[in-house]
Amino acid sequence: MRNAPSDQRHCPDEKYPITESVCHARRARHYQKCKTCKWRDVADQPVPVAERPAPDLDKIFKAYDIRGLVDGQITKHLAWKVGYGTATALLERLEPEARFKPADQEIAIGHDMRPTSEGLARAVAEGVRAAGVGACVIGEVETPAVYFAVGSLGTLGGIMVTASHNPVTYNGFKIAGLGCVPVGMGSGLEKIKEIVAGLADTDRPATGPLRMHDVSSAYLLHLKKFAGDIRPMKIALDCSNGMASKWVPSLLREYSLAVEGLNFERSGRFKHEPNPLKEENLEELKTRLRASGAEIGACFDGDADRVGLVDENGEVVPNDLVTALLVPGFLAREPGATIVYDLRSSWALKEEIEKRGGVPRRERVGHSHLKAAMRETNAPFGGELSGHSYYRDNWFCDNAVITLLEVLTVLSAHPEQTFSELTKPLRRYHTTGEVNFEVQDKSGMIKRLARTFSDGKVDFLDGVTVEYADWWFNCRPSNTEPLLRLCLEARTEQLRDEKYEKLIEILGEPSEH
């Protein structure tokens, strides 16, 4: 937790308070004023991780990350164990000679702006160091900056303390391994869970080294490599009170963009849910965009690894169409390359890839599947309907700021066309979007759908997908809830509605969540 207002840290003779991470960084640099500061002893003490009732690990270890309520589930005690477990599990992947020199390895650790995140990150660092591994603390950053640190510094892995778009009462941990390879269930998270479950105490000494590292300058230079010639224009930017406000506004102004800013404050409170996939969370952005005459609007999620885009009319441009918009640039630079996308994406995306001479690669939903397919095919680019876009030259990782810079580059290359005019040819099909249905027997329902629509082209890559000449649908199970998620697309609006009603007769009424 952050210090109470009456107990905030100040450097001697300085007016403004500083955070724990700034205090630690100054101590690490032997800052002159630290010699006489009352906080010098406190800053060097280990994070208290008092014993608490153990949370139910099955509830907080998800398919791709660890996430739960900060009251009783995600605690400093657990954070220490996650740090220790991650360091131990990643060390075991190394060759023996490297494994037995843990202090030569580092794990990059970052955190978002939630009130609990800084304290959890300190506990993570102590756990990492207790495993003998070095902790490279990069402070309050967006999730893609942790990937950058792992990739550019060659660290053993990285841990980001964040709960992304969840309410401030949640927190959690996203983990990457060596080379930014994702760590999820089936790729190492189950091992970390096993280690965490077996830890009875958290009082082991922190023997691994600790250092503070500022990635700001190097990270921004890396982002700029993906931008082409960007002309001056006006952009409406909603940072959702999340991490995008740290660097994105100033970066965009470097390209002479006029930024109409919304929700830049990183106070740990969200004015709206920081999830750009939900249309209701874009209303404030749309209003500002129309009032200001901006050419494009962008809304980031809480940890800034996803972005939602709207055109000058306030119309949402879904991420499969954003992917399609960027395809020509990637295939012009690398003819014949593979472009990876998730199976919920519009037919228009596959057609654009083929039209430009590329190889379309349809994949299961989830960043681990997209990244693995990209590594296998050396694909320069990939996109998910969820708002994640992946770049080979970014260690095959997602980065929402790169996506925005790429889109601005395309807009700048076609000054005679608006954003809506550029995307209009891609809106040639009619979709339901992703709709949820509460279904207890998910596998039974998927089998029933396959039987019912057996006259179409059926596959089971992820749930069930059925394709006909003029429409298709995918119905896949949620990893964590008794939900089936349906996407349906057709050549005409009438056909979409007709087939959607037919599926509702089988699946029942759509769920609210």
Image (cartoon, rainbow, N blue to C red):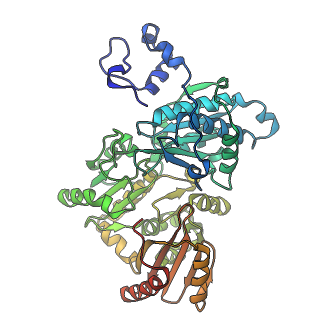
Q: Name the residue rendered at 38%, 58% in the picture.
A: 276
Q: Quadrant of residue 154?
A: top right
Could you say where residue 71 lies in the image, as x and y percent from the top left?
Answer: 47, 41
Could you say where residue 465 lies in the image, as x and y percent from the top left?
Answer: 57, 79
Asked whether residue 233 appears in the rendered view, the answer is: no
Residue 381 falls left or right of residue 203 = left
Q: Quadrant of the C terminus?
A: bottom left
Say if 200 sits above or below 441 in the image: above
Q: Name the residue rendered at 70%, 47% in the picture.
A: 191
Residue 356 falls left or right of residue 131 = left
Asked whether residue 265 appears in the rendered view, the answer is: yes
Residue that lies at the very extreme toward the left in this rendered image: 291
Q: Quadrant of the N terminus?
A: top left
Could you say where residue 346 lies in the image, as x and y percent from the top left?
Answer: 47, 75
Say if 387 sits above or below 83 in the image: below
Q: Quadrant of residue 54?
A: top right
Q: Name the residue rendered at 46%, 51% in the picture.
A: 305
Residue that lies at the very extreme toward the front in this rendered image: 53
Q: Nearer the viewer, residue 189 or 490?
A: 189
